[in-house]
Amino acid sequence: KVRATATLNADGSGKLAATIELDPKAVELAKRTSGSLTAAIALQDLKGAGWSVGEWIENEQGAKIEIERETVSPSDLEAAIEEIGGGRDGVLREVEVKIESGLYSSDHQIAYEVDLSKLRLDDPEMVVKLQAAGVTPAAMADLAANRATKGFTLELTSDLPMSESTTKKFQWGDTATVSDTSAKYHPVSAGLV
C-alpha cells in the first residue's frame, strides 16, 4: 500500500509526503530477493534529490517507511510527484500543478494520470532477482496475471487551499485521469465595477 499526500499552499509552496506499507509476505520476498528492505526498495537515492527518507519500521503487520519533500513552487511539486511516481513514464504521469490568480478569483489545481495497468516482469534485472530468490516461472506468471498484486493499493490525497482534502484510491490494474481543484472568489468593491 502506498499513501501519498500532495499539499499545495496558496503561495505556490507545498509538500509531498508518502508512506509505503508492506505486508509480511512482501517483506519476506523483498528480504529474500535483496537481503534487506533498504536494498530491495531503493529509496535512498531520493535523499540526493531533496527528500527526507525515514527508516523502515518492521512489526508483525509488515513494514513501513515514510518519505517527504518540501517544494517551493507548483513546478517543483510537479517534479516531486513525478519522482515518486517513477518519472514521466511511471505510474503517475502528465502531472500538472497550477495556480491561476485573477481579479475575481484564485484557482488551484493538481492534475495527473494514474496507470497501474502494467506489472513490469520483462525487466531482465527483475527476472534475475526473482529467480535468485527462488521465484519459479509459474509464480512469475502468477504475478504477471495480477493475482499476486490484488492487494496493492495506491491512495493519493490532494490538499489544496480553500478546500477540503480529497483522496482517491486505486488498485493494481486501474487507470484514471484525476483533476482536483479549488477556487476562491474575491469580492470586488462597488467602486471598482
Image: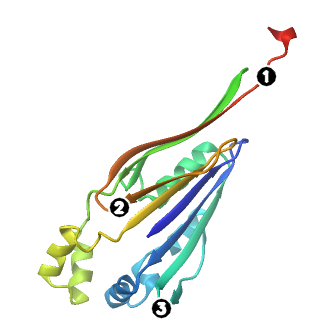
Q: Distance between the Cα atoms at labels 2 and 1?
A: 42 Å
The image quadrant where one finds the N terminus is bottom left
Residue 171, disc: 2
Q: Earlier in the sequence, mark 2 or mark 3?
A: 3
SS of the residue at dot 1? Answer: loop
Q: Which residue is mark 1?
A: 187
The image quadrant where one finds the C terminus is top right
Does residue 193 appear left or right of residue 16 in this picture? right
Q: Is residue 155 above or below residue 107?
A: below
Q: Earlier in the sequence, mark 2 or mark 1?
A: 2
Q: Is residue 96 above or below residue 92?
A: above
Q: Residue furthest right?
A: 191
- The residue located at (51%, 90%) in the rendering is 59
- The residue located at (52%, 75%) in the rendering is 44
Amino acid on which disc 2 is placed: Gln
Q: Is residue 45 above or below residue 87?
A: below
SS of the residue at dot 2? Answer: strand
Q: Residue furthest left?
A: 138
Give how far across and how far down residue 43 sits, in percent.
49, 73
Q: Residues within 10 Å of mark 2 (few under 14, many from 20)?
A: some
Q: Is residue 97 visible?
A: no
Give how far across and how far down residue 109 sits, in percent.
57, 39
* 92 or 123, nearer to the observer: 92
Residues at marks 2 and 3 touching, judged by CB atoms closer than 8 Å = no
Amino acid on which disc 3 is placed: Glu
Residue 167, disc: none
Q: Which residue is mark 3?
A: 60
Q: Distance between the Cα atoms at labels 2 and 3?
A: 24 Å
Amino acid on which disc 1 is placed: Pro
Q: Is residue 107 visible?
A: yes
